Amino acid sequence: MIEFEITGERANKIRCFEYEVFKKYQEAAKQYLPFIHEHGCELHFELGWSNRLRKEWSPDGLPMKNDYSCCVYCGIERNGEIVRMESNDGEADYYLLDCTWTISQIYRRFGKLRVLLFADIDDDMDTDMKEMLSALQNMTFT
């Protein structure tokens, strides 16, 4: 097997893209802050990189190889912990009020590395945030 890594100017362009899109997510999230603060909560945003094949995760970036991904993690926190929503579906005891959005992925197809860059944040983010806010609205805190 031949291992490839994206380096140099291409890697720099991808990393700049990731940070730019992360800033867009942060900016777009500001509209939800008043409602979240009204419930005594905070919005936590984090950029992270992973490679599932190598079982690696980093908040500072990883080599751009096969199975690389960069994601935005978003969670609603109260007292420094992600808010837990009690489950009534029997699948789990609770669900966390958090979500993840993919910014970039690198994968191998027919021996060549492919790069996917996701710049459009509006629909996915809005849907996920509204679902989390709806759950938050229906919760009571002691």
Image (cartoon, helix red, strand yellow):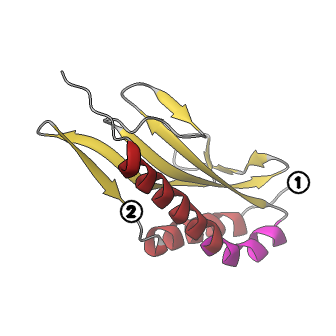
Mark 1 nearby-residue class (10 Å; few <14, some 14–19, many ≥20): few
Do we see residue 91 in this rendering? no
Magenta span: chief secondary structure: helix
Disc 2 marks which amino acid?
Answer: Phe
Q: Position of residue 101 (x, y in %)?
A: 48, 57
Q: Secondary structure at mark 2?
A: loop
Q: Secondary structure at mark 1?
A: loop
Q: Quadrant of residue 75?
A: bottom right
> Which residue appears farthest toward the top when viewing the image?
1
Q: Is residue 80 magenta?
A: no
Q: Position of residue 86 (x, y in %)?
A: 66, 49
Disc 1 marks which amino acid?
Answer: Thr
Q: Residue at x 74, y 62 (%)?
A: 139
- Please give left or right for residue 1 compared with residue 116 in the image: left
- Which residue carries the number 1 mark? 142
Do we see residue 62 in this rendering? yes
Dot 1 or dot 2: first in sequence order is: 2
Q: Position of residue 68 (x, y in %)?
A: 38, 39
Question: Which segment did they paint magenta?
Answer: 28-39
Mark 2 nearby-residue class (10 Å; few <14, some 14–19, many ≥20): few
Q: Residue at x 45, y 51 (%)?
A: 12
- Please give left or right for residue 2 compared with residue 142 in the image: left
Q: From what the image shows, is residue 23 above or below residue 90?
A: below
Q: From what the image shows, is residue 17 above or below residue 91?
A: below
Q: From what the image shows, is residue 110 above or below residue 95?
A: above
Q: Residue at x 72, y 51 (%)?
A: 83
- What is the spatial separation of the Cα atoms under label 1 and label 2, in whole angstroms? 39 Å
Q: Residue at x 81, y 69 (%)?
A: 37
